[in-house]
Amino acid sequence: MNQLIEKITGMAPLTDQVIATDILMAAKAEIKSYALAITETATPGVRNTLTMQLDEVITFHEQISTYMINNGFYHPHDTKKQLEIDRKITETALRLAKG
């Protein structure tokens, strides 16, 4: 993000980690939405279409998760390490909210 915009808005720069985390959260939400939609559909054609889209977003989730793991942004198999990262992110967000 442009430094002038950062100063005007008071926002921290968007890092790869922040962007990747937002994308990962969106993918997780999509997975939940498609899964729910599949259980509510009445026709096989729509169900098949939604299932194909669900498969695509699951593949995308795997790709973004792998990117985050490889870059040290996400530690799904090390709860302690992931909680520490989450705590730091939360503290930063709280600091930004206070201004």
Image: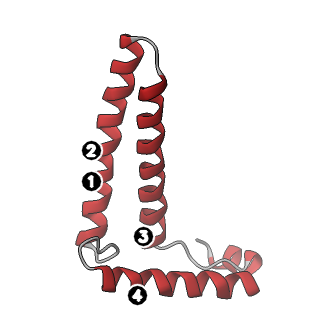
Q: Earlier in the sequence, mark 3 or mark 4?
A: 3
* Label 4 sits on residue: 84
User: At label 3, which amino acid type do we have?
Assistant: Asp
* Label 2 sits on residue: 59
Q: Is residue 70 left or right of residue 91?
A: left
Q: Earlier in the sequence, mark 3 or mark 1?
A: 3
* Label 1 sits on residue: 63
Camera sees residue 99:
no
Residue sitting at x 61%, y 73%: 2
Which part of the image, by quadrant, shows the C terminus?
bottom right
User: At label 1, which amino acid type do we have?
Assistant: Gln
- Tell me which corner region of the image, top left, top right, bottom left or bottom right, holds residue 38: top left
Q: Could you give the CA–CA distance between mark 3 and mark 2, rounded to whole angstroms?
A: 20 Å
Q: Secondary structure at mark 1?
A: helix
Q: CB under 8 Å between callouts 4 and 2?
A: no
Q: Nearer the viewer, residue 84 or 93?
A: 84
Q: CB under 8 Å between callouts 3 and 2?
A: no
Q: Earlier in the sequence, mark 1 or mark 4?
A: 1
* Label 3 sits on residue: 16
Q: Nearer the viewer, residue 86 or 12?
A: 86
- Neighbor class of circle 3 (other Cα within 10 Å; few <14, some 14-19, many 20+) is few
Horizontal and vertical percent for residue 74?
Answer: 33, 72
